[in-house]
Image (cartoon, helix red, strand yellow):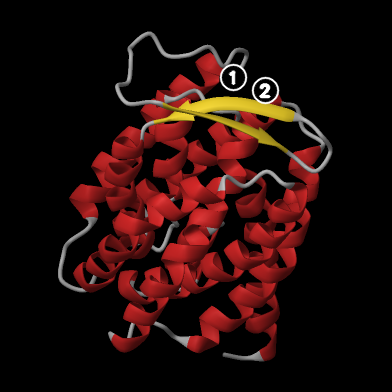
């Protein structure tokens, strides 16, 4: 890897880090199509390098969001209970499973979520169905703004399995599942969801990175410059998020989800 390519990857990591910490997805959806289409990196090495960047972004962004007081720490820890073992399974599976079919199903789910979140971005009314076992929560951030919402511990533990597996299997960060569950199902405030999603990855991603490293899925010539960029970008995203209204943040979320879906499709359509 020459200096020019390292600088390119540093810039990609910074851009992914800003967007990833802004919306709580970690930035993997930006890195993956770049590595697959521009550099021709294999799926396993792509997932490994992307997850290293997601971890760096999660560390940087979580520090910023914790200072803002917008992280539901209890929720993030509960996700990690089932997310950590699932993350190990995902990292081991990526070398042995054809992901073309899974990508297609996953992309279809993301497209559905894009449509749903665009529909509800003007209003965060509770869903029409009743989720059993809801736990009421009240969070006051560093500026004194109060957020009231609820979530189900059982569904949180179940979603942790999908979050952890997808985080390491795709290297995309499991935040997208977090967003689907906590915005579409519980109608939680977008600012709390994005901050807590990134914090959850802070607990889950290190396990996936360690598993990827032991499996030989991490090429440091790609991972290190991406991670350095992710660290820098992770400080800027939360500052931008604070200045956006909930509808604006949801709109950014929706188009990021759309970009994720298109990137998953494109790596099979154009990378042949």
Q: In this picture, is 20 found above or below 242? A: below
For the N terminus, the quadrant is bottom right
Label 2: which secondary element: helix
Q: Nearer the viewer, residue 103 or 195?
A: 195
Q: Could you say where residue 242 lies in the image, as x and y percent from the top left?
A: 78, 40
Q: Is residue 247 left or right of residue 207?
A: right
The quadrant holding residue 250 is: top right
- Residue shown at the point (63%, 80%) measured from the top left: 225
Tell me residue 231's x, y (percent). 68, 70
Category of crowding for the residue at label 1, using alpha-carbon neighbours closer than 10 angstroms: few (below 14), some (14–19), many (at least 20): some
User: Around disc 2, counting alpha carbons within 10 Å, would you say few (fewer than 14), some (14 to 19), or many (20 or more)?
Assistant: some
The answer to whether one can see residue 25 in this image is no
Instruction: Please give the count of numbered marks on the rendered protein.
Output: 2
Residue 170, given in percent of the width and then of the height, sits at: 35, 60
Q: To which residue does mark 2 refer?
A: 247
Instruction: From the top left corner, tell me how far across and down residue 22 is, in percent.
Output: 67, 47
**What residue is pinned by disc 1?**
121
Foreground residue among 189 and 30: 189
- Disc 2 or 1, which lies upstream in sequence? 1
Residue 268 appears in the rendering:
yes
Res. 209 mark: none
175, above or below 127, in the image:
below
Of residues 147 and 216, the one drawn nearer to the viewer in this rendering: 147
Task: Please name the residue shown 69% across and 84% down the image.
Answer: 4
At a point 37% along the width and 85% down the height, the residue shown is: 213
* SS category of the residue bearing label 1: loop
* Residue 127 in the image: above or below residue 207: above
Q: Quadrant of the C terminus?
A: bottom left
Cβ–Cβ below 8 Å for labels 2 and 1? Answer: yes
């Amino acid at each position: 890897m020459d200096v020019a390519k390292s600088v390119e990857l540093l810039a990609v990591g910074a851009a992914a880090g800003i967007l990833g910490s802004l919306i709580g997805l970690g930035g993997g959806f930006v890195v993956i199509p770049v590595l697959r289409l521009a550099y021709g990196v294999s799926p396993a090495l792509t997932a490994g390098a992307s997850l290293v960047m997601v971890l760096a972004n999660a560390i940087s962004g979580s520090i910023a969001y914790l200072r803002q007081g917008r992280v539901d720490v209890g929720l993030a820890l509960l996700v990690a209970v089932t997310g950590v073992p699932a993350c190990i399974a995902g990292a081991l599976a990526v070398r042995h499973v054809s992901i073309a079919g899974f990508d297609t199903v996953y992309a279809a789910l993301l497209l559905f979520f894009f449509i749903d979140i665009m529909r509800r971005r003007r209003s965060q009314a509770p869903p029409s169905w009743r989720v059993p076992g809801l736990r009421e929560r009240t969070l006051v951030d560093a500026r004194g703004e109060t957020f009231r919402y609820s979530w189900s511990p059982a569904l949180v533990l179940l979603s942790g399995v999908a979050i952890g597996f997808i985080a390491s299997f795709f290297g995309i960060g499991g935040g997208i599942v977090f967003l689907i569950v906590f915005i579409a199902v519980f109608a939680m405030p977008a600012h709390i969801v994005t901050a807590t999603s990134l914090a959850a990855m802070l607990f889950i991603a290190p396990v996936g990175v360690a598993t990827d490293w032991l499996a030989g899925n991490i090429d440091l010539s790609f991972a290190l410059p991406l991670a350095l960029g992710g660290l820098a970008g992770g400080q800027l995203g939360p500052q931008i998020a604070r200045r956006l209204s909930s509808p604006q943040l949801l709109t950014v979320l929706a188009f990021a989800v759309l970009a994720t879906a298109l990137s998953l499709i494109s790596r099979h359509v154009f990378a042949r």
